[in-house]
Image: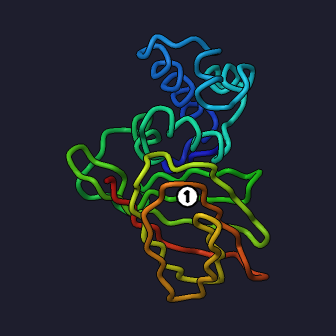
Amino acid sequence: MKSTADGGDPEDTVDLRLGARLAELRAERGWSLGDLAERSGVSRSTLSRAERAETSPTAALLNRLCHVYGRTMSQLLSEVESQSALLVRAAEQPVWEDRSAGFVRRSVSPPHHGLRGELVEGRLTAGADIAYDRPPVPGLEQHIWVREGELDVTVDETEHRLCAGDCLRMRVWGPTRFRCAGPEAVRYLLAVVLP
């Protein structure tokens, strides 16, 4: 995982703050690593390495933890970024990258206290394929608008092919999958609204 919004070394502080926040969330609930492993389906060693920032968590791992903690990924990432502002300049929009999955995520309008919606830009490299076994928050409303390329989105075993200009809206209760369907990278905007 990489975050590059601040222009500094992306690995130094964001990974450390994210690991510390994950450890805080577990401690707030009084859970051991074993308890969290049982709830999330992630091994204790993987959880421990993520909390100590010895490894950068993947999008799929963060999704599982967000589900357990009842947060969207943007909410979790915003907790380790600087204070949210009402106006977010392009150069200040946090960027998070899962290089192993070929996924780049820009928080165009990060979560803000008291607001239920956010806007995210996603980019998948050619052939990238990301599967989530559950939503971070059950009943999450999403609107996916493809700007460039082709995107296959699978929701509850139904696959939707989206081309540039197409928009898919859905309420997420179960597994989803995002796959770059074309020979070129795909860029899309994702509006996320908490239930």
> What residue sits 61% from the left and 79% below the top?
160
What secondary structure is found at the residue carrying circle 1?
strand
In-front residue for pair 18/93: 18
Question: Is 14 drawn above or below residue 90 in the view shown?
Answer: above
On screen, residue 178 versus residue 191, left or right, reads right
> What residue sits 26% from the left and 49% below the top?
85
Q: Residue furthest left?
A: 114
> What residue sits 69% from the left and 58% below the top?
130
Residue under pointer 1 = 105
Question: Is 97 drawn above or below residue 18 in the view shown?
Answer: below
> What residue sits 46% from the left and 18% below the top?
24
Across and down, in percent, residue 68 comes to 50, 33
Across and down, in percent, residue 172 comes to 47, 59
Across and down, in percent, residue 132 comes to 63, 52
Q: Is residue 119 visible?
A: yes
Q: Is residue 9 visible?
A: no
The amino acid type of the residue labelled 1 equals Arg
In-front residue for pair 60/57: 60
On screen, residue 17 versus residue 101, left or right, reads left
